[in-house]
Image (cartoon, rainbow, N blue to C red):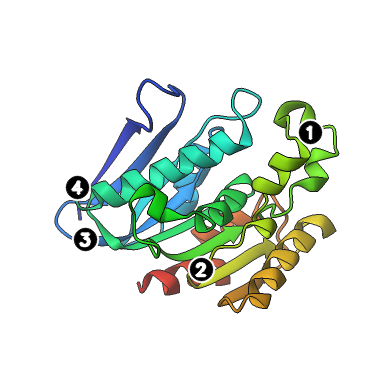
Amino acid sequence: IKWSLLKLMLIPGRHPTAYFDYSFHVSRAFPIMSYACQPTHPALAWSAMGDIKGACVVLNNYDLCPTVTMREIISQNRSALKWIYQNAKKIGGDPGRIHVTGHSAGGHLTAMLMATNWKQYDLPFDVINGAVPISGLFDLEPLRISYLNADLHMTKEECVDVSPVHNLPKFMPPTVVAVGGGETDEFRRQSRIYTDKCREHGFDVSYLEVENHDHVNVVGELRNLNSPLTSALIYQMGL
C-alpha cells in the first residue's frame, strides 16, 4: 500500500500558521478520521494515529490564543472539516464516512464540531458519522475564572458560546467520551458532565475511562491496537 503525506495551508492568506496534514491511499475511498491537533504536538498525533490502518487520517492544525480568540479557533476547525468533506475523494477518503477525534483542547474542539449547524456551511447536517473526544474540556467556566484567561480573553458570554455543555447539537452521531482513569478529578468530571448532558437529550453517548492513564499519556493508547480507546475508534469507522 502506498501512502502519501502532504502539508497544506488551511486558510491561505488568512492565518499563515494554520495548516493540516493528511495521509491517504491512492486508489480506495477510506473512512476519514479528522484529528484536531494542537499545533505544538503534530509529531505526537501522527505517532498516535499511525497504526490505525485502513483510514484516511487528517490532522487539523489551528492558531492559538492570545493570537486569536476561542471562537476563531473553533471556526478554523469547522472550515477544515468543510474542506475535508469537499475534497474527500481527492485525498482518498469517503465524504460519507467522516469521524472526528482529538485530545485535550482537541477533545473540546471535537465536541464543538458536533455542535455546528452544518447547513450554514452548505454541508449535510449529519456530515460527522462518529466522534471520540479524548480528555476534553466541555465547560470552560473554570478556565475563564482562572489565570489562564489572561491568554484566552474570554468574556462570560463567549465562555458560554464556546462550551460544549451549553451547545449540544440537534443531531449527534454515536460518540465515545474518553478520559484517562488516572487523570485529575476535574478532567474526569468534565467528561462525565458532558456525557450526562448528552444522554439527557437522548443521544447515543458512551463514557470510557482508559485504565490508569494520566492526561499526557492517555492519547498514546492509540498506538495500542488492543486498547479500548483504539477499539472504539476502529469500531466507529467500521474497520
**Which label was assigned to residue 172?**
2
Alpha-carbon distance for marks 1 and 4?
40 Å
**Which label was assigned to residue 68?**
none
* Residue that badge 3 annotates: 29
Name the image quarter holding residue 165: bottom right
Nearest to N terminus: mark 3 or mark 2: 3
Nearest to N terminus: mark 3 or mark 1: 3
* Residue that badge 4 annotates: 90
- Horizontal side, residue 201 vs residue 110: left or right: right
- Mark 3 or 2: the one toward you: 2
- Horizontal side, residue 192 vs residue 121: left or right: right
- Horizontal side, residue 35 vs residue 82: left or right: right
At which x and y percent is residue 193? 75, 66
Nearest to N terminus: mark 1 or mark 2: 1
Are dots 3 and 4 in contact, CB under 8 Å? no
How packed is label 4: few (under 14 Cα within 10 Å), some, or many (20 or more)? few
Nearest to N terminus: mark 2 or mark 4: 4
User: Which amino acid does the dot numbered 2 rest on?
Assistant: Met
Are dots 3 and 1 in contact, CB under 8 Å? no
Q: Secondary structure at mark 2?
A: loop
Nearest to N terminus: mark 3 or mark 4: 3
* Residue that badge 1 annotates: 148
Alpha-carbon distance for marks 3 and 4?
9 Å
Q: Is residue 12 above or below residue 139?
A: above
